Image: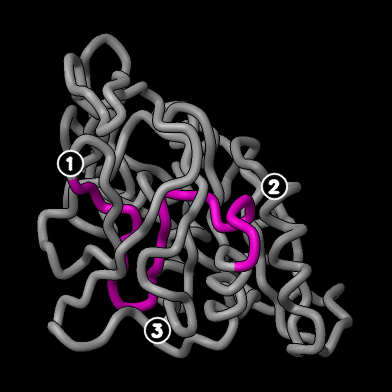
Amino acid sequence: MFFACSAGTACTYSYQIHSNLNPFRMSNLKTVAVVDYGSGNLRSVSQAVRHVVQGTGYEVLVTSNPQDVLNAERVVLPGQGAMHDCMLALEHSGMLGAVLHAASHKPLFGVCVGMQMLLDNSHEGLDGAPTPGLGLIHGEVVKFDLAGQLQPDGSRFKVPQMGWNQVYQSRPDGVQAHPVWAGVPDGSYFYFVHSFYACPSDARHIAGEADYGGRFAAAIARDNIFATQFHPEKSADQGLALYRNFLHWNP
């Protein structure tokens, strides 16, 4: 696998996938693969998903083996820290090609920086240069610009945003929210920790919004991809509901 990119654009990737089944996989359960590329909150994500898979016929596999991602029925892509570091880690881990393959073949759930990586590029780069993303959803990732703005209580907005915030489910067709929101009340609170947020080029890819000095995309979706800027695994029952719905979602 190799990739090439120029500043400010999404990378162009070429990769080869060998999709033979893992001969050592003996379980009859279907698999949710949590991608371990060395840069993600794997413990809390995997514990949350393990909690909701009980009795569903799924098992959770935290893996740094590309073949496991290829064999899995569903994939979770976590991420935390700087997007530049996450993209490098994903490439160097050898997992990048498998993630791209999954994104075009099976349900994929991106979390926090795992959501930001799905876009074309991020303003969070080195020496002022944008960081290329995976280009799976067109758009860019920008930093909160809240200098001088005050919250309703008179305090200044802080960056990063850390804490609970309401998420309003977007309805691009004007009628129905995304299926992964099923049973989750509109305006539910979820837990955020971030300084940057996604700006999809197509508003129809915004699956949920929150307000922090202005509306921003708290969740995005396209085809078989759903992703959140907030952390479902840190968001109590409503966060677990999203992971549970992801297991039953058939895009």
In the image, what residue type sits under mark 1?
Gly
The C terminus - image quarter: bottom left
Q: Nearer the viewer, mark 2 or mark 3?
A: 3
Dot 1: what SS? loop
Please tell me which residue is depicted at 34% across the width and 52% down the height of the picture: 118
Q: Horizontal and vertical percent for residue 38? A: 65, 37
Q: Which residue is label 1 attached to?
A: 214
> Per the image, is 221 magenta?
yes
Mark 1, other Cα within 10 Å: few <14 / some 14–19 / many ≥20: few
- Asked whether residue 130 is in view, the answer is no
Whole-angstrom CA distance, mark 2 to mark 1, is: 30 Å
Please tell me which residue is depicted at 67% across the width and 54% down the height of the picture: 45
Q: Horizontal and vertical percent for residue 11? A: 27, 43
Dot 3: what SS? helix
Please tell me which residue is depicted at 22% across the width and 33% down the height of the picture: 142
Q: Horizontal and vertical percent for residue 98? A: 52, 60
The circle drawn on residue 112 is none
Dot 2: what SS? helix
Vertical side of 134 occupied by 226: above or below: below
Vertical side of 241 occupied by 157: above or below: above
User: Which of pointers 2 and 3 lies earlier in the amino acid sequence?
Assistant: 2
Q: Which residue is label 3 attached to?
A: 179
Q: Which residues are magenta?
A: 215-237
Please tell me which residue is depicted at 36% across the width and 72% down the height of the picture: 186
Mark 2, other Cα within 10 Å: few <14 / some 14–19 / many ≥20: many
In the image, what residue type sits under mark 3?
Pro
Q: Which residue is label 2 attached to?
A: 42
Q: Tell me: 34 left or right of 97.
A: right
In the image, what residue type sits under mark 2?
Leu
Whole-angstrom CA distance, mark 1 to mark 3, is: 25 Å
